[in-house]
Amino acid sequence: MEYSIANRTFTMSAPIRKGSDVHIACAVFHASVDAANEFADKKRSIEINDNLSNNGKRAALEPHILTLWRQISASSKKIRAERLAAEKRRADLYAVVPPANADEAATDREIRQWWRDAPKEQRNLFRNEMKEGKVDQRILLALLRSPIPAAFDLEMAAIKAAHEASVLEQKRGVAASIKDDEDAADWATRGMAHVVAHAYILTEMRPLDALSLLLKAGDEAGAIAIGFSESDIEQKRGK
């Protein structure tokens, strides 16, 4: 699918849809494309105005430059918020309820100790039962509550992966909705990279110039959402 900003085109895949509507993250990207084209039109009308000197043209253009970067900032923040919300929904989908009290936590530790002492054949049987949906849920819960990171326990990593696969199978509709939200936010993020690149050209600004503009407007969150790092911001403020 082709998009155009100031007669410059770029190609992207079709936007993600929710039912008959374009996903909100994709719609936010579209709004930024429109804003960039609106700025290009205003810039053109100012540039051909013979009643303005070069300095006057620049002065007339400055508020529109700020408006464009604020729009890009707002869109980037909204898309980033959509991505974070999708990530939280996925985390909630796999979330394991923590122990309700000290006694329950102690029982968890006993079960995990039993697991570590169990012969390999018994642990393999447990994992096979997981695949069949016949596993003892209390044992599974204790194992999933293990404080040891999965990266340091390959067997536990396999159990957690099997658990997540089971959750996805049981909640296909929710999982598909989350995946759509993630895909839409990622699609819109890629699109915003095009908008930002075109905005640098249209506003005749270098990246650090745009960063200065956003920081002057008190929009550090927008700068980060656009793609500037904390170190970029610290370095710019240090100058």
Image (cartoon, rainbow, N blue to C red):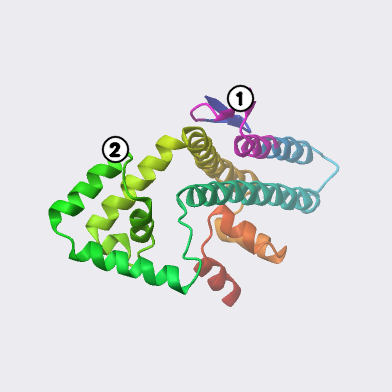
- Residue nearer the viewer, 132 or 74: 132
Q: Position of residue 185 (x, y in %)?
A: 54, 42
Q: What's the CA distance linking mark 1 and mark 2?
A: 34 Å
Q: Earlier in the sequence, mark 1 or mark 2?
A: 1
Residue 123's disc is none
Q: Residue at x 66, y 65 (%)?
A: 215
Residue carrying label 2: 132
Q: Which residues are magenta?
A: 11-34
Using the rendered image of the protein, determine whether residue 202 is visible from the camera's viewpoint: yes
Q: Does 23 lie within the magenta span?
A: yes
- Quick one: label 2, few (<14), some, or many (20+) residues within 10 Å? few
Q: Residue at x 83, y 46 (%)?
A: 52
- Residue nearer the viewer, 67 or 100: 100
Nearer to us: label 1 or label 2: 2
Classify mark 1: helix, strand or loop: loop
The amino acid on which the numbered mark 1 sits, given as a three-letter code, is Gly
The quarter of the picture where residue 207 lies is bottom right
Residue carrying label 1: 19
Q: Position of residue 216 (x, y in %)?
A: 70, 66
Q: Residue furthest top?
A: 20
Q: Does 33 lie within the magenta span?
A: yes
Q: Tell me if 115 is positioned left or right of 71 in this view.
A: left
- Residue nearer the viewer, 21 or 187: 21
